[in-house]
Image: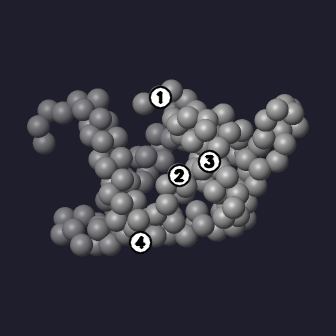
Amino acid sequence: MEDVTTTELASDLVVHAARLVRAVRRELELPAATRIISLLDETGPQGITQLAELDRCSQPTMSAAVAQLVEQGWVTKAPNPADARGTVVTLSDSGRAELARVRRLHGERVAALVDAHPDLTTEDLATAVAVLRGILEKAPLQEGTP
């Protein structure tokens, strides 16, 4: 392997991980709303403004998306006990079930891609998962981190 820096490899990791996620999402034709329920799973209950910031969208866009999620039963929306002007959005059991379904579909598709690749093994996949998990557990990405 040519002399590649850790920074170059790390950049490639981010680029290819993002491309893989986008490609699988496009192929499976999953609703964009799964991104929001995934955020709620990761961060816990949030206000509309906080969700919009996390998702890098406008507050009106997030309000509309949350209204659809409430209608689907994937989230609940309740008054914010700390701020009467706001609401708190919480992932529901139905939303957790949908997220588990989506993650299973993602896993099945990526497993099929690995199985179909002549040079990749389950051990290679385990290494990739360990690297990503290790990065996120030791130094969780903060808001504003690219």
Q: Which residue in the structure is indicated by mark 4?
A: 108
| Front tag of 4 and 2 | 2
Query: Nearer the N terminus, badge 1 or badge 4?
Result: 4
Q: Which residue in the structure is indicated by mark 1?
A: 145
Mark 4: amino acid: Glu
Q: Which residue in the structure is indicated by mark 3?
A: 64
- Residue 35 - label: 2
Expressed as whole percent of the image width and height from the top left, the position of residue 98 reads: 60, 67
Separation (CA) of disc 2 from disc 3: 14 Å
63 or 107, nearer to the observer: 63
Give the residue displayed 24% in from the left and 72% down from the top: 116
Q: Is the N terminus in the top left, top right, bottom left or bottom right quadrant?
A: top left
Expressed as whole percent of the image width and height from the top left, the position of residue 78 reads: 82, 47
The answer to whether 108 is drawn above or below residue 5 in the figure is below
Separation (CA) of disc 4 from disc 3: 31 Å
Q: Are marks 4 and 2 in contact (CB under 8 Å)?
A: no
